[in-house]
Image (spheres, coloured by chain):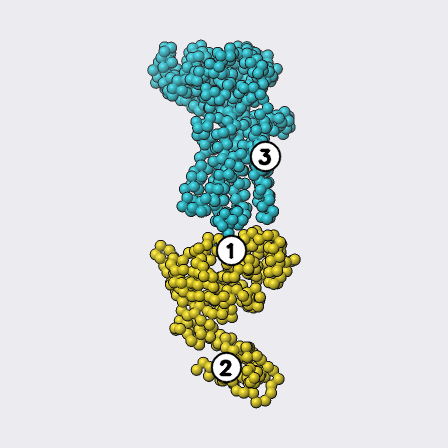
Chain colours: A yellow, B cyan
Amino acid sequence: MIKLEHVSKYFGPEKKTAVDDISFEVKEGETLVLLGTSGCGKTTTLRMINRLLEADSGHVYINGKEIQSLPPEILRRSIGYVLQNTGLFPHYTVSENIGLVPSLLQWDKNRIRERTTTLMDKLRLPAATYADTYPQQLSGGQQQRVGLARALAADPPVLLMDEPFGALDPLTRISVRREFKALDEISHRTIILVTHDVEEAFELGTRICLMNEGKIQQLGTAADLLFRPANTFVSSFLDPQRLQLELKSLHIRDLWNWLPAATSPVSKQLTAQSTCWEALEAITTQPVSVVYEQEQKLIDGNGLMAAIAAYKN
Amino acid sequence: MEPTETFFDFIQQQSGKLLEQTLTHTGLTFISVLLAVAIGVPAGILITRRKRLAAPVLGIAGVMQTIPSIALLGFMIPLLGIGPKPAIVALFLYALLPIIRNTFTGINGVDPNVTEAATGMGMSRRQMLLKVQLPLAMPVILAGIRTATVINVGVATLAAYIAAGGLGEFIFGGIALNNTNMMLAGAIPAALLALLFDWLLSLIQHINIRKARKTIVALPVIFLVLSSFYLLPDTYNGKMLAGFTPEFMGRKDGNLGLKSVYGLNIRTLVISDMIMYKAAYEKKLDVISGSSTDGRVKAFDLVVLEDDKHIFPPYYAAPIVRDETLKKYPELEPALNLLSGTINDSIMTDLNYRVDYLKQNPEKVAKDFLVAHQLFKPAGNGSKGSIRIGSKIFGDGYILAAMYKMLIEGHTDLAAVTKTGLGGTKIVFDALVNNQIDLYPEYTGTGLLVILQTPQHITDSIISDSRKVYDYVNSEFEKQYHIKWLKPIGFNNTYALMMRRTAATQLHINSISGFTKYVNQQ
């Protein structure tokens, strides 16, 4: 769906390298997270995809089409874009903000209103209450949801998100993120999301692209980065939160072979799709049982820890 | 009589004129601001896009702002002549800087997150400008327009100097005539206009940006309507155009007399004395209110129309001296009287012509004259005392002061210093009364009307006889100020209506009555 080939970008008169020969491909419906510290080149990479920046070398394709083949305005209207500080227009109402791209695409008025209302309802901003308010009157979390609705309004197949939850306080961030994940508008889209928040990357990314100094350090699933790091940078980057990340990214079914079989029936049940983190939360009071592939297994504290240790070896 | 009462009396009497001037003033202000918006806003937008141009463009507009307004008007005259054109251009240049600068600042001040979002959503540069940058910069741009408008209401008062009209006519007339009511009748409405426009524009600036979208569409229309006020007052017909000084406009022995005694009703512009003669010569004006001995009458080949109904009082020049000084130095009076009877109108005109037009030194002109009339003697030792000679800032004054200095130093043992350029009548006369100077050349008419403020019935009874006027001022000055009028020099520097010699010959006009008849026939 989105393909980058040997893309590089230099800044300033001394041609400082910001992005150094990056290639990757994002499949349709996939969410790729560009993760890294400030100045690693992740935002620069993102901005080259909707041509807010022009690549100095290399090629970018969307749906097999070179992005240079379209005028930048036309290209951008087909790509949803969410900014960290929302960038909502203070002189437009909420519904005008959301309807911006459709109006640039010259949809007719009724269609714009219908689409705007649908999106506002889905994002828990009832049109009756919020359609004619101005962004300044909303809370930070609400503004962020309007920013998301604006990016989704014209139903673009591709969504670029630049630190979309970065400006929110930690509590709001978690709840907005959870809503975002559950949104049906999101599920079928191809998304590239930039963040410096490891937890966010692991929660939202189908795959994660960890970058440093303009280069890709590793591109893979959460489990790849955790258990099969490509280099010491990758492992040391994840070390501070390793235990939590591991528990959240390991599922019961991944440990199935190492878990003991259930001997006595237990009333509390979990599914094999649950993460170890969820299992741990459940077994703080009593052990639970899981049924998977016609087999029942018992999970208690000791058994779970032993299974994790066995998995990692 | 309460001063406030007379002010309102004045307003009431002159309400027609006041309304006309206010409309003209409003028109001048808004035409120029409208032009400045039409040029300044695009220029401001341009320099946000080509940052390299920002410094030179803002620099040039800034330099315009630093040129003193009266000088800027002066620069315009050779390029655009007199009247509204140079005034509007000068006001336009003044209004540019705040408008360009605020457009530039306003657009640059738009949150970069918002402009990035606009670009990222797929807006073209044009859409971004019209839908995002201009609406968000609008309060700042309006603040610039507001500043420009207020500045221009003030500067537009100066337009009266170059015959463009406006409330400056009353202000400068009031200053020239030492008439406070007239001055206030111009100054107060000008201040009120500035406050009013400032307040109205502040309302527009502070209403909700969203509603402002519609208001801003209406704004150019409002500006256009206000601009058109400039065109309203022209209700006179006829081809003849008069240019009168602000002082002449308000005087009984000036335009008011022309109207009441001669019945002259002519389209009139108010214009500064400095450019009036040249404007007549260049056919921008047909008739002007000159002074009969001005050198420029000769330089520009103008002809004085005969005052056949005697509305202009005699302005015979004579030295006026403090009694104290005459008593202390009895030899002074004969020395000063040597000049009496030697200079008639045409000689004075010629002397002024040499100074004003040929740019000869007044001392040299004075000496040449005295030598030619065998009155010049080399300076004595000047040991007996010192005489201070004053003069007004006109050509006559400089030359006469120089002559008196030479006469005193050549014919007595006194020394003399000249204090020329003491401004108008009020300043130089006050200097004489307060013993800052000992003598200066004054005109009988000025003494009668300006200094003594002689009541109307006395003026009427003596005005047509120059001898009676001289005797009256001499006795009154002696009584009131202990100042003596010595013998008249001979020339009569009176107000005069004058026109181009060629035009006068062609139309067979040689008197004001004849001129009035010609104008009223049209």
Residue B50 versus residue B426 in the image, above or below: below
Q: Which residue is mark 1?
A: A77
Q: Are marks 1 and 3 in contact (CB under 8 Å)?
A: no
Question: Is residue B408 something one can see in this rendering?
Answer: no
Residue count near mark 3 (Cα–Cα under 10 Å), binned few <14, some 14–19, many ≥20: some
Residue B239: % across, % down: 54, 19
Q: Residue furthest right?
A: A128
Residue B157 versus residue B378 in the image, above or below: below
Residue B210 versus residue B38 in the image, above or below: below
Q: Residue at x 54, y 32 (%)?
A: B28
For the residues beneath circles 2 and 1, the answer to whether they share a chain is: yes
Q: Nearer the viewer, residue B396 or B108?
A: B108
Q: Residue at x 50, y 58 (%)?
A: A79
Q: Which residue is mark 3?
A: B225
How far apart are the two marked residues, 2 and 1, measured between alpha carbons? Answer: 45 Å
Which amino acid, by three-letter code, is at mark 2? Leu
Q: Residue at x 46, y 19 (%)?
A: B281
